[in-house]
Amino acid sequence: MIVLKGKTHNLGDGFTVTRLLPDIRMRSVGPFLFFDYFGPVEFPPGKGIDVRPHPHIGLATVTYLFEGSQMHRDTLGSVQEIRPGDINWMTAGRGIAHSERTGDVERARVHKLHGIQTWVGLPMSDEEAAPYFQHFGAAELPLKNDKDVEIRVMVGSAFGLSSPVQTFSPIFYADLYFGIGGSFLYTTEHEERAFLVIEGEIQTGYDIQGVVSYGPGTMVILNPGQEIALYTDYPARLILFGGAPLDGPRHIWWNFVSSSKERIERAKQEWKDGVFGLIPGDDKEFIPLPEDRKIEDKK
């Protein structure tokens, strides 16, 4: 197994973001190329997040919250508040721009924010797919209870549940809440698998030093073919995710993902030239192209 703690950055006002993927030891898990865990944070009135309009190609962004809310807007005209338990899936494909901000109602009062944003790479045949936005509320996502564990599958299929989100390759993304004494067998249903501890501590067995347990903010990537028991003596919450690896290397530059470096160069120029278009209701500012970044390769 590979255990990751990630790199944490303070973005101001006590808001921290921990980047867990990509990591030098594991660039991706299944099609998940990028994994940011943010919060928990409590904002005072007048404060919040303001991620200005910015572009994407060749991926899907996936947002999931444990606390708080965000307003999503994009160049398709989508306007959607996301709340805890909902799932936002935005297919960038050949190109889309979006913004993520705290809404006016939330910003006017004390509010919390806690959640995850991931990037899912698209198969080569779908890298230039038409951009598309999907939102499903918590009540629309499949849920079941098994051995004192509540299981919600937000994306893909796993553990006998299938999400309504349209995807492009074998994938799963699930939220598990363990009650007191809950246990769960993490099987080899998917080729690549990992889990992230959100709350409490999760145990996986024993070694020569005693019980092996993992606390909040820890990501554990399982070995190929490894089946593992997860259990706890107290309430805990985990995110389980993974799927089939992508069909070849990907290049990552800023917010762009592609199997072609030339395509990324074209996307840079398109952002400069305004080809991505404007976001209705959020067209007064944008994040400029960071000229000094280097392209990263997924091995």
Image: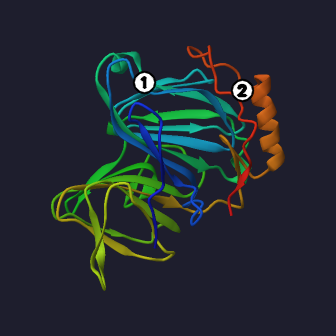
Q: Which mark is residue 276?
A: 2
Up-down relation of residue 159 to residue 263 (above or below): below
The mark tally for this picture is: 2
Q: Is tag 1's residue or tag 2's residue first in the polypeptide sequence?
A: 1
Q: Residues within 10 Å of mark 1 (few under 14, many from 20)?
A: many
Image check: 262 left or right of 195? right
Q: Nearer the viewer, residue 288 or 165?
A: 288
Amino acid type, residue under disc 1 in the picture: Thr
The answer to whether any part of residue 293 appears in the image is: yes
Up-down relation of residue 16 to residue 7 (above or below): above
Residue drawn at x 64%, y 37% is: 92
Residue 34: x, y in percent? 56, 50
Q: Residue furthest bottom?
A: 208
Q: Which mark is residue 102?
A: 1
Tell me which corner region of the image, top left, top right, bottom left or bottom right, holds residue 270.
top right
Residue 213: x, y in percent? 29, 69
Q: Residues within 10 Å of mark 2 (few under 14, many from 20)?
A: some
Amino acid type, residue under disc 2 in the picture: Phe
Residue drawn at x 54%, y 55% is: 21
Dot 2 falls on a residue whose secondary structure is loop
Dot 1 falls on a residue whose secondary structure is loop
Q: Nearer the viewer, residue 220 or 44?
A: 44
Residue drawn at x 64%, y 27% is: 287
